[in-house]
Amino acid sequence: MRCVVLAGGPHDAIAAGTPGAPNKAFALIAGRTLLERTLAPLRASTGITAIRVVAPPSAHDHPAFALADEIVPDGEKIRDSLRSGLAGLPPDEIVAVWTSDLPMLSTAAVDDFIARAMEADADIGYGCVEYGVHVRRFPEVPHTWARMREGRYCGGGAIAIKPRALPRLDAFIERLGAARKSPLRLAGLFGWGLLARYALGRLSIGEAERRASAIVGATVRAIPSPFPEFAVNVDRLSDVALAERLLGSANA
């Protein structure tokens, strides 16, 4: 499977801690950039055939790119970067799209996600981690949890997508963005019954998949990972110190 790594985005407080870093992907975490810590397990995976990194043109001479096969320019928004990353790839071929802020990512987690994504063979596969899996190893790492009938889940560090599905996903994201602050518009998008079941923790993953598939107009599947490191990312400045502590413990 080919993979795309999204290393675009603006300069932020995380990047500010590393001189010359254009964005957080190039911020140093325990001596290595987040991008390198993400690319290394991808490069070591036998399930990945090629790595394309989406990054600012100003960063294209960075040594981290030695682990990539190709570099393409990022866009103003994440949707633009995703479009750039998938451009020209076979429309019916599953591509794994990764964030670039996964300091604890392991090759085992990569191999597992690739295998599950291939088995699901969906137009869009959403990587996630169940609460119990996460807290057994990383109880100190906070997440936002979605309460489903089967348990609580957070998003992971990758999705699997067939490039032909991107226009439909784009349209859905636009509709969701327009509706997110209006309960009536959200109900019109998802249905009152589905929202009520979700609020009560009675919505099953299968029901969510079927409704998402109907709305997007493409097959959507959840891809749960048994590897909690798959969902440990660096979103806030406080996450930098936490990631360094976790790396220190892992290497002790």
Image: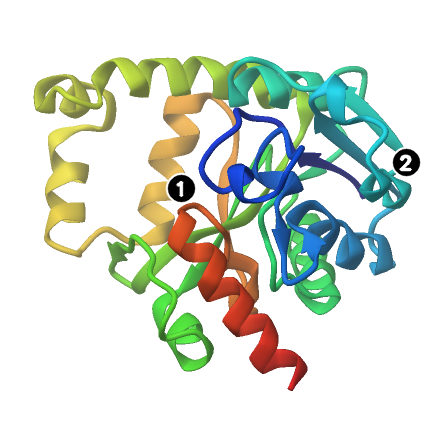
Name the amino acid type tagged 2: Asp
Check contact, mark 1 vs mark 2: CB within 8 A. no
**Which residue occupies the extreme front position in the image?**
19
Q: Is residue 60 visible?
A: yes
Image x and y of residue 133, in percent: 44, 74
Q: Which residue lies under the disc numbered 1?
A: 209
Image x and y of residue 232, in percent: 50, 59
Instruction: Please give the name of the residue rendered at 71% of the width and 27% of the height, measured from the top-left corner.
Output: 54
Instruction: Please give the name of the residue rendered at 19% of the width and 38% of the height, measured from the top-left corner.
Output: 194
- Which quadrant of the rendered structure holds the N terminus? top right
The type of colouring in the image is rainbow
Residue 59 vertical placement versus 104 (above, below): above
Residue 244 vertical placement versus 97 (above, below): below
Q: Is residue 249 left or right of residue 69?
A: left
Q: In this view, does 246 lie to the left or right of 51?
A: left
Element class at badge 1: helix
Circle number at residue 69: 2
Which comes before the other along the chain, label 1 or label 2?
Answer: 2
Mark 2, other Cα within 10 Å: few <14 / some 14–19 / many ≥20: few
Image x and y of residue 87, in percent: 75, 16
Q: In this orientation, which residue lies closer to the viewer: 248 or 18? A: 18
Instruction: Please give the name of the residue rendered at 76% of the width and 59% of the height, measured from the top-left corner.
Output: 41
Mark 1 vs mark 2, CA separation in Å: 33 Å
